[in-house]
Image (cartoon, rainbow, N blue to C red):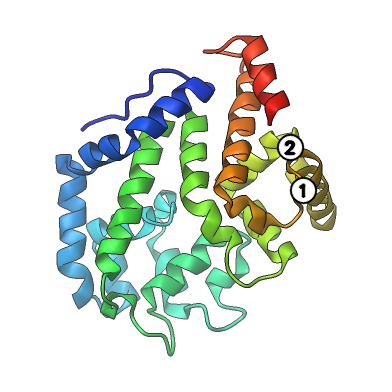
Amino acid sequence: MFQPVLVSSGIVGWQFLQRTYDQQLETFSQSAAQKRDTDHFVEKIRSVTSAEELVSDRQLLTVALGAFGLQDDIDNRYFIQKMLEEGTTADDALANRFTDSRYTEFSAAFGLGPGEIRGSLRSGFAEGIVDRFQANSFEIAAGAQDETMRIALYAQRTLDEVVGGSGSEAQKWFSIMGQPPLRTMFETAFGLPSSFGQADIDLQLGVFQDRAQRSFGVSDPSEFADPEIMDRLITTYLARSQIANGGAGESGASIALTLLSS
């Protein structure tokens, strides 16, 4: 299978990856293993009418979960089936009990719960899931070489969706905190320790808002959908990650200049 080409870590590596992303993703997505799973998904998903049918087909489930970054749950078939069967319309549905919003998004997309309309009946559904699966799979492959690249790619692809929508500012911050890759990015960019997640949730919210205002001049997470602000966030994350890792791949002066510029 084609593996992502990363010429360096940190900001230099990120700039190269941005320039070559489309070509690399296309090559990666055409590999035999990827094609086998995605072609099967496109062919079969429309005929799936129940959660049990979906979880019983490992190839289908691989693509379905992978599209939402939930690939680590591939062997938790009972858990996934129950989540899909309960749907998302009830407040106490299983998917709605998690702080990680990806579970709610996953269950809602497939629409296999009570009173829901199957997602596979919508035009372009299969192709949309496949696109997400391919992007996420590429990110995982990049992360096997450099975890910071996976997180940066994931944030670039999903952050505008997470902070878009109609929820309150607090709800959007909680959605960011509830997705491990995004939480890692913001905590690092804000200079917070990973243990910060153990603090009281309201305290976390206040600190996130304060650090966003101090570091980026915004407190509303919706502002991070702006390409310029998102770019500053990712650059700051990569620079701080390099410092934490001893500045591999770039001089300390260059990293410091990047942080000052951000």
Q: Rounded to the nearest whole Å, what is the CA distance between mark 1 and mark 2?
A: 8 Å
Is residue 9 positioned above or below 228 on the image? Answer: above
Q: Residues within 10 Å of mark 2 (few under 14, many from 20)?
A: many
Label 2 sits on residue: 190
Is the Cβ of the residue at disc 1 closer than 8 Å to that at disc 2? Answer: yes
- Picture residue at 22% right of the left edge, 70% below the top: 45
Give the farthest residue toward the bottom.
Answer: 115
The C terminus lies in quadrant: top right
Height in image: 184 above or below 84? Answer: above
Please tell me how crowded label 1 is: few (under 14), some (14-19), or many (20+) other residues with Cα within 10 Å. Answer: many
| Image-quadrant location for residue 191 | top right
Residue found at x 51% / y 38%: 152
Q: Position of residue 112 (x, y in %)?
A: 38, 79
Q: Secondary structure at mark 2?
A: loop
Residue receiving disc 1: 208
The spot of residue 55 in percent (x, y) is: 31, 65
